[in-house]
């Protein structure tokens, strides 16, 4: 075992085994620490964000009084738009809580329903004009303060006039709960509406669409251009000082801070080409410029990894250089190309700095549907929400981050599927 | 035995074997012709036999060339190697046998037609027929690469020896009685000896065939009569 | 003296330089049609370089310069107006390590005819594929699995597939660069038998570091040493009584 003739204990077998055990222990420890951080991060995120997927709703009996909405009995939907829905709402609330009186209390009462309630009533009548002159039980969205109170985010330690939710409102909420007119429902609105000043109305769809449109442009520009550039540089051009120069520059571009690309976009796309500000097309171009070096480098290295025997076989049969690349080398290099593209796209997904420079930071309430509609992107939206003072935006920020991560996971899964499909054994 | 994957190799080996077999058949004809010449004392035929010997010499040269080529170009192994080496040796034995037949033919016209010689000649012809048959069988045994048949022939050399010894005794006693025709008697002696040697060479061929097929030497000592 | 009409490839003073360093020194020889000519010699003697000159595969190597002329049926292939791509369709090449494309067996063989437009319709293409596989001695073994990947075959089968692929474009010359060095003896024997039957239709030039293979398979042998052509002649002569001392030394294993 331990040969006394060996020079020093450093070479003994037991010492070597001990070293190995220690190394393995460190590795395991590092993995566990990483995992712990991951668990902390996710549980924090989910804990903060899960509330965003539910909203508090209050059921009220709304009287769509003919006199208020359509006094002239025209039956014209256009007329309904002009009605005083604020009044209708106030009446419904006072009907429920008849004991309320005085301006201060009435204001408090009105405040328990979210400000979008008025628009909701109007929209409902547009959909169902036959409801004019009837009374309906409608679930209205509670205001963000009430929502936060129900979710336990507002503490009652502070005196009454220093809180967002005063004691009277708490009393009313209790009554509504008891009579079954208060519920917490799934917040579908989060997924179907764009941003809003009112937290209870704010949704992620605008940002999702903006990101989707932007990334579509990014992909459409960076993938073909990047792959073809790599093919040209790697396979078709003669090696010279010029191509070496290009290669060095591409490698360096991959390390340029993203905000520089934003400045480029501002200077060139907006000021010279006068492209629409805040539009996905500009964002897409800027991000494409940023992603291009990554795609080129990944493609080149995958092309290099294809064994020369395949090229020789094709060339020996009389295939031209382009045929060799397109028929044989590129298909074999596809897994690597996809990996590079997804890496680039994932980076583009999370970049907010260049998008800020080209103006995709504005407050957009409409959901963008085409490439030149003003839009915002997911990371920007999260940043804006994180910056807002309302307490309700805290959970929205976390929820937005979860959506972003989901996006990322989906993109990566797509990459894995595509890679597996194209992987061939050689 | 299955064929070689490379068919030209098979073809070349076949060519070697058939050239040796051809040599054998030619030599056989020479032996029969020379016995006939001995019986008839035909000098014209004898001359022809001597000329025809050249054909067999040419074939031996061809066998040597074929063997050399096969050894250089095919890297033969195992039974192929034994086949080539044995064929080379056997062709040399056949060439010697043909030479003996040619010798006998050469001497035939020199035999006198005196009575004592006439008395002795039939037994020599009988010896001639025996070795001729032996040789014919051995050529067939080679063609078929049949080592059992070869060893049977190998055993029959005893009879040749016995017959030869008897003939020698008779010739010598006749020589003693007929001092005047010593010359003719000497010719007869040589012819008988040549025929006996012919039989020996056939036995050599038998041993080579045994080695070709079995890859080892036949252990028993050669039987002597 | 060989008749002019028997000469398929006439090599005249070919020299090859790799970035200034000389690899082949003024090689001249006449390769006869419908015969197998082998190139032997120790490692680094230039035989593979020479082979690759015959179909201008050396063009693809950076810093490679070729001087001299190679005439195939009287036309110099190093003439600048000659189209290299169509030249390579007339000359098939089989490499040391079998390199089938990672496609189906059918697609492997069909690739050449497709890119050169040799088959008008699918039926004709099927015929070409089948007859090529048949001539390569592979059809019997794989005729019911033509859509399986080419790389799923054994080494010997893969090499025969590469040969089928090369003959599918109907070349006149087939070049083989140590085609059996990655194969076992039985597979090697099969390929050698195949070469024997192929020479009736094609002119074959084979590089081999196994001189016993050269002895078995070729009718003409040339011995290369350090970039020079030392001796060229009939195989039987080279292996039984070579003219040059160096040749004899190499063949008998006294050097190299």
Image: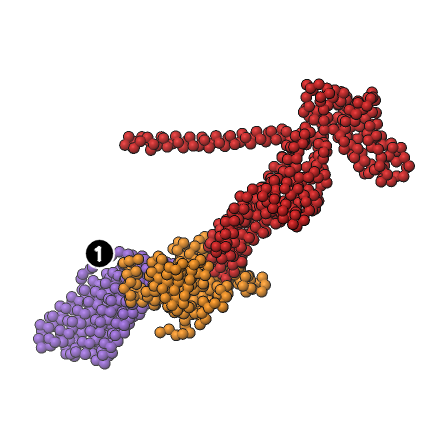
Chain colours: A red, B purple, C orange
**Residue C15 picture location, percent across and down:** 38, 64
The tally of labels here is 1
State the residue in front, B86 or C127: C127
Q: Which residue lies furthest to the bottom in this view?
A: B44
The quadrant in which residue A101 appears is top right
Residue C46 located left or right of residue A37? left
Q: What element carries label 1?
A: loop
**Residue A137 picture location, percent across and down:** 81, 30
Residue at x 16% of width, y 77% of height: B111
Residue at x 78% of width, y 34% of height: A120
- Residue C215 in view in this figure: no
The quadrant in which residue B207 appears is bottom left
- The quadrant in which the C terminus of chain C is found is bottom left
Residue at x 68% of width, y 45% of height: A277
Residue at x 53% of width, y 52% of height: A230
State the residue in front, B60 or A235: A235
Q: As displayed, is residue A332 above or below residue B151?
A: above
State the residue in front, C255 or A70: A70
The quadrant in which residue A15 appears is top left
**Residue B66 picture location, percent across and down:** 31, 66
- Residue C125 in view in this figure: yes
Residue C174 located left or right of residue B185? right
Mark 1 residue crowding within 10 angstroms, few (<14) / some (14–19) / many (20+): few
Marked residue chain, label 1: B
Residue tagged 1: B220
Residue A265 located left or right of residue C38? right
**Residue B156 picture location, percent across and down:** 23, 62
- The quadrant in which the N terminus of chain C is found is bottom left
């Amino acid at each position: 075992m331990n040969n006394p003739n060996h020079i020093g204990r450093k070479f003994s077998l037991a010492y070597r085994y001990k070293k190995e055990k220690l190394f393995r222990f460190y590795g395991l420890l590092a993995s566990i620490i990483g995992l712990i951080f991951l668990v902390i991060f996710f549980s924090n995120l989910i804990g903060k964000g899960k509330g965003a997927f539910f909203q508090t709703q209050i059921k009220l009996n709304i009287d769509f009084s003919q006199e208020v909405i359509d006094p002239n009995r025209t039956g014209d939907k256009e007329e309904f738009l002009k009605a005083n829905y604020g009044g209708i709402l106030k009446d419904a609330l006072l009907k429920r809580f008849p004991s309320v009186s005085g301006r201060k209390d009435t204001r408090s009462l009105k405040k328990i329903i979210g400000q979008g309630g008025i628009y909701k009533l109007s929209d409902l009548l547009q959909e169902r004009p036959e409801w004019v002159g009837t009374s309906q039980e409608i679930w209205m969205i509670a205001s963000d303060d009430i929502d936060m109170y129900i979710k336990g985010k507002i503490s009652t330690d502070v005196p009454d006039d220093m809180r967002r939710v005063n004691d009277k409102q708490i009393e009313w909420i209790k009554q509504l709960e008891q009579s079954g007119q208060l519920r917490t429902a799934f917040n579908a609105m989060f997924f179907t509406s764009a941003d809003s000043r009112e937290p209870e109305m704010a949704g992620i769809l605008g940002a999702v669409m903006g990101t989707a449109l932007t990334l579509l442009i990014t992909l459409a520009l960076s993938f073909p251009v990047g792959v073809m550039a790599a093919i040209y540089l790697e396979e078709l051009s003669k090696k010279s000082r010029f191509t070496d120069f290009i290669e060095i520059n591409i490698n360096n571009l991959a390390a340029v801070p993203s905000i520089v690309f934003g400045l480029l976009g501002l200077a060139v796309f907006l000021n010279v080409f006068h492209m629409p500000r805040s539009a996905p097309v500009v964002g897409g171009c800027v991000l494409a410029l940023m992603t291009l070096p990554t795609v080129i480098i990944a493609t080149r290295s995958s092309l290099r990894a294809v064994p020369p025997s395949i090229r020789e076989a094709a060339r020996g049969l009389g295939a031209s250089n382009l045929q060799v690349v397109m028929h044989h080398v590129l298909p074999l290099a596809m897994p690597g190309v996809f990996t590079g593209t997804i890496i680039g796209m994932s980076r583009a997904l999370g970049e907010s700095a260049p998008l800020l420079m080209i103006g995709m930071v504005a407050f957009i309430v409409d959901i963008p549907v085409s490439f030149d509609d003003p839009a915002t992107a997911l990371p920007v939206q999260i940043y804006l929400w994180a910056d807002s003072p309302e307490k309700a935006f805290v959970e929205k920020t976390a929820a937005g981050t979860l959506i972003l991560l989901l996006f990322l996971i989906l993109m990566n899964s797509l990459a894995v599927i595509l890679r597996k499909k194209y992987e061939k054994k050689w | 035995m299955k064929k070689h994957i490379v068919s030209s190799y098979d073809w070349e080996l076949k060519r070697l074997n058939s050239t040796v077999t051809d040599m054998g058949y030619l030599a056989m004809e020479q032996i029969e012709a020379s016995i006939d010449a001995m019986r008839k004392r035909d000098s014209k035929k004898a001359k022809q036999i001597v000329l025809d010997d050249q054909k067999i010499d040419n074939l031996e040269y061809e066998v040597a060339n074929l063997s050399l080529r096969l050894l250089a170009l095919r890297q033969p192994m195992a039974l192929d190697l034994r086949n080539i080496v044995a064929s080379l040796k056997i062709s040399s034995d056949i060439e010697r046998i043909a030479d003996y037949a040619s010798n006998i033919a050469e001497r035939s016209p020199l035999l006198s037609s005196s009575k004592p010689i006439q008395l002795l000649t039939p037994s020599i012809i009988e010896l001639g027929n025996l070795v001729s048959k032996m040789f014919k069988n051995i050529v067939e045994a080679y063609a078929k690469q049949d080592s059992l048949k070869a060893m049977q022939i190998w055993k029959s050399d005893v009879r040749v020896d016995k017959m030869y010894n008897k003939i020698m005794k008779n010739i010598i006693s006749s020589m003693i009685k007929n001092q005047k025709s010593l010359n003719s008697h000497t010719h007869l002696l040589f012819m008988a000896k040549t025929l006996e040697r012919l039989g020996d060479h056939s036995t050599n061929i038998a041993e080579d065939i045994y080695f070709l097929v079995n890859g080892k030497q036949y252990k028993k000592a050669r039987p002597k009569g | 003296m060989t008749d002019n009409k028997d000469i398929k490839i006439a090599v005249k003073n070919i020299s090859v330089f790799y970035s200034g360093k000389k690899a082949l020194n003024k090689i001249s020889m006449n390769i006869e049609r419908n015969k197998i000519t082998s190139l032997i010699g120790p490692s680094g003697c230039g035989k593979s370089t020479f082979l690759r000159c015959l179909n201008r595969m050396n063009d693809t190597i950076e810093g490679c310069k070729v001087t001299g002329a190679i005439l195939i049926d009287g036309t110099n292939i190093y003439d600048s107006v000659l189209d290299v791509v169509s030249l390579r369709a007339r000359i098939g090449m089989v490499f040391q390590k079998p390199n089938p494309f990672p496609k189906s067996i059918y697609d492997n063989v069909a690739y050449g005819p497709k890119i050169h437009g040799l088959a008008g319709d699918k039926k004709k293409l099927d015929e070409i594929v089948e007859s090529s596989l048949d001539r390569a001695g592979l059809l019997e073994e794989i005729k019911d699995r033509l859509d399986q990947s080419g790389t799923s075959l054994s080494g010997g089968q893969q090499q025969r597939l590469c040969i089928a692929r090369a003959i599918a474009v109907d070349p006149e010359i087939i070049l083989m660069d140590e085609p059996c060095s990655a194969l076992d003896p039985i597979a090697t024997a099969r390929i050698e038998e195949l070469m024997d039957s192929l020479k009736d239709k094609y002119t074959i030039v084979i590089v081999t570091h196994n001189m016993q293979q050269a002895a078995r398979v070729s009718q003409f042998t040339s011995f290369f040493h350090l970039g020079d052509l030392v001796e060229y002649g009939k195989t039987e002569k080279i292996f039984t009584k070579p003219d040059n001392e160096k040749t004899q030394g190499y063949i008998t294993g006294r050097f190299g």
